Amino acid sequence: MAATELLVHIQAALQCITSPSSPPGMIQQAQAALLQWEDTHTDDYVAGLMSLVGSTSDRVEGNASVATLRLAAVLTLKAAIVRRWKDKGRGKVGVQKSLLSDGVKTFIRQSMLNLILTGKVDCQQQTNQTNFITNPNEITSQQLELLQDRPLQTNAASLLSKIARMDLPLKFQELIPTLVEGVKCSQGVVCQIQQQQQQTPQMQQQQRVFQTIRYNTMVALEAILSEISTQRLLVDRKYRNSIALQYLGSIVESGLVPSLQDLESLKGVSNGMGEEHISALKYATLASRVVSYMMVSSFGKLVEETATTSLVDQTLSLVHSFLSQWLPFVLGHDKNATNCALRKTMKELLHVHCDLIVNLQCSHPIAFVRYLNPFLTLFHSSLMYIVSGRKEANHGTANASTNMNIQSSDQYTIAFLSFLANVVGTSKYSESDAAKNELTSFFTPSLIQSLSQTLLHLFSIHIYPNQNSNDEDDEDDNAERVQWQDDPEGFYQYEMQRSSEDDVGCASQNLFLALVESSFSSEIVMPWLMQLLSNVASQRLAVEIEGGISAGIDARILLSAMPLGAPPTKLSHGENAALDLMLQWDAIYTAAGLAGSMLESCPGFHFRTWFDASLGPCLVLLLQSKPQQQTQLPILRRRIIWLLSCNAHQVTISSPLNPLGMLASALSAENDITVRLTCVQAMDALLPQCEGSPSLLHSIVEPTAPALYRLTNECTEVESRSSCLDLLSNLVTYVGMTGGSLTNETLNTIVTPLSSIWDNATDQNLLLKRNVLTILSCIVSFVGPESCSVLYPLALPLIDDSFARNENVFLVEEALTLTLTFLRLSNVYDTMLGKLFIRAVELSKDLEYMMIISRITEHYIILGGARFLNDHATTIQMVLSNIVGEVRPRGTAYIFLPIEALLCSFPVEGASLLQQCGVLKIFMEACASNYFEDDKCEPDRVIVLYLTALARILLVSPSTLQTLLPLKLPSGADFGEEELISLYLLKFQVAGNGAHGLLFQKSWALLLVSFYPPCQLTSCYNIVLGKSNAIFSKVIYLLQNMLPDGTNVLSYEVGYDEEEETVDIGADMHGALLQEQRTKDMVFITSLHEVISTKMNGIPHELGPQKYQDFLSTNDTLRQLDEALTSNPK
């Protein structure tokens, strides 16, 4: 197909796809056609798309929107370039992927640059350079159409960034220099026009055109730097450093500085903002982002180089000046003012500058030391200004008062808090004298205490967010925040999931924790916190107010009782001073929980003592209050319980206050859902402290189990419901661990609802099925072998359901573990339990479950015996066919568990079963491959297992050997009986590795000796007669190392690879089963002495006098063998 014809087809396809009247079938055909052309005519297809990207109104016929066609073309082009630019080593093996030629790549690179910088696309593929526009009169209407198409330019920038990621730094090295030059050139023309004394309409139009070019170029630069900033290779980092060193100055001079200067005129805007104002702000934001990418990625290098140090100073001074000028302007204006549009539009730009400083300090803390003080001063003063509405002494913010309410997602506050937290928490500063001097001079004791007090005020602003807001962003914030009084469960989950990146309370907690842990501030913060905690009267008053015991208290009394003093106006709840008091104690308790071990290490403070004397009695008082007495949210009740979870390891579980009992009581009472979920959290934390108190655990399970189920039913979030069920399973586990007991009534209470929970676990609640299986596993382990079969009617259908449905695939591992638990705790085989094994066929196709399926199959065979084998012989064959030969060597060790169990218990039937499903053939082929040392042969540790299985089979069914040998390998080599016997001799020492080594070696020795006459395989006994010296030496070694009673001949077992895979339950019963199996295993019970003696006595008769004499004369190990038999009696 010719290129021009293809172009027509591509255009038609794109117009079909973008037409709202096209039927779905036609759209699918058009999409398929595009993909086919991309694959078969890659170069022409991409070149055609590039041509359509440059389409203008005068070149496209029809009624279709040209802008829509251009957008469709550039989006399709971007997708094609990602797929066809370079080979990423993906896709089907052996399938050659059609890639773009170097010539077309060059054409695309240059065309995209020209599109952004000049609004031109050379459709003849003759473009090899970019000619910047310097004369406004040269711009055609077609260029203007492309330059002003914002969606097109945005996607063109995105496409260039994808190319940059694949090309740079080795190719397309002119990309960034060209764009930087484009910024400088367009900025130069804009400046020339602005300097004209008389501004005609034509000049104003020309200025807007070059501002558009400047904007498009900066969009492209921002997209490219954003894309390559995530690359981590050393060559990429070096390239980013070189770009920053060469071009940061140009971007600052031609982009950042003029863009920020253009914003000066915005201060006088009072009647709304025009399009030019919005554009100026957006361009300043883009220029700031480009500078940010360059500086954050290469700040250390920029500071090191003498040539760029002054540039960094100038840039950060500019940023500091801009923030100092505009933060008060934005923060200090009434939200009802007419210029609120300006304030909101400025937000993004200010956030970019704030984030630049935060990221610079975080990424390059030592290099940033010289700039710490001015930004510490600015951010701290701005934070205090936001909170208090007044300037801090010596910190120079504006004097304007502010009515702006602090919202829990306020990005300014979060940025200031994050910067301060990063500075205080940077451990490298302790190694730098300059940094220590900066920090100690700034963080004076009074500032630290004032800052700490402010942080505590911010801890709890999310509990009662201020609803009195006229700002749309704040209204959105309130709409997204879950309110405790409206949705207690949702509030609990929100609080658990919030992070310091988007929540003021979390960010303030991070900073407080940094102050607590810092060497220069902890000695100020910790005594102050201890002093707050010692204010017994204040916290008692707050508790009585929440509990409804005290009410109508004069506001002045409440104000005097506030441990943090009067809250800032913007954080105060007006006339509700009682709420302010409770929130302050909520914050203080939160601080105590965050301080944790640091607080415990302070002289004079012990959590146990404080809990018994103050905190515990307060909780008792709150829990004893009746719901109708409570006029406030249970803020302190919830926080004290949370504090217990933070300090669980410091709690005396046997305290007269009985903290665990208090929590169980709170969980069972008519408490708020948030309180009860916090009880679940605290009880879970306290359980490890109860290992020495089984009676205490027993006493709380009976009331707690129904309370947990009730809470589970009341909750709607899967995380809440899952935490309740987790606690229930942990309670049962710890009762069992401590040797406690549970009544049948309590066990029934726990077990009965599980089936209903399972049936109703749909959609997001599907995850609760995992909790059900966990609880069942805990109950099975608790009741033990005596009663576990009682759970079959409930548990086994749920296990089977886990295997049967695709939606339950995430449960398979837990269900398999529970199956193994049942097996290990079962005294006798039950056909109901045996029916689950049918699912193993499908499950074994996923080798992820191979290890545990192997253990389960082993246990079924040993426990079920003949009944199981008769019922499931075919299933066993199918399972083994799925996994044998398909796994790595470690996996083969697990596979051998059921094979060993099968051949120990049923050697004849097992041999037939393995032969019928082709497993023996796999074994023998692998042995042959190893013998001849083929490149892809299995390692020795695998071959040892295969040879052991073959030895067991040939001991009871020697004729099987004739069905397996000889083998013809692909190489042409023959593997027969002699090679097999030689392989046993070669690997004999390897077989002795591991605890079960003597067992393997004994089975091999029995096989080799069994080949001696009398033997039905005459070909074999002729071979062993010729190898007798080697065979007897192995036998002698074995006789010398086996104990007379055979106790050091151990059964085959495989340990667990990872701790989480370990199933310890029923280990003793499993060991007993293996011991019982030993008594039936012919390898264990057969006397090697007797077999050897019998064979030695039969050889003379079989060979005749002459051959026997020849045999004696050629075997010098016979005397040693006789001595070994004598000195090592059976």
Image (tube, rainbow, N blue to C red):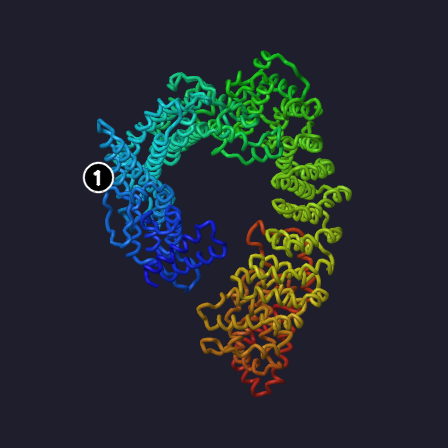
Residue 176 appears in view: no
Please, what is the three-letter code of the amino acid marked with disc 1?
Answer: Asn
Q: Dot 1 lies on which element?
A: loop
The crowding category of the residue bearing disc 1, from other C-alpha atoms within 10 Å (few below 14, some 14 to 19, many at least 20), is few
Percent x, y of residue 3: 32, 60
- Whether residue 119 is visible to the viewer of this picture, yes or no, is yes
The residue wearing badge 1 is: 135
Q: Is residue 795 left or right of residue 347?
A: right
Residue 28 placed where, x, y %? 47, 56
- In the drawing, does residue 540 fall left or right of residue 16? right
Residue 355, image quadrant: top left
Residue situated in front as seen by the camera: 991 or 888: 888
- Residue pictured at 37% horizontal, 29% vertical: 274
- The answer to which of 213 and 597 lies nearer the viewer is 213
Position of residue 450 relative to residue 600, above or below, is: above
**Quarter of the image where one finds residue 370:** top left
Q: Quadrant of the C terminus?
A: bottom right
Quadrant of the image containing the N terminus: bottom left
> Where does the image place residue 956, in percent across and percent down from the top left?
65, 74
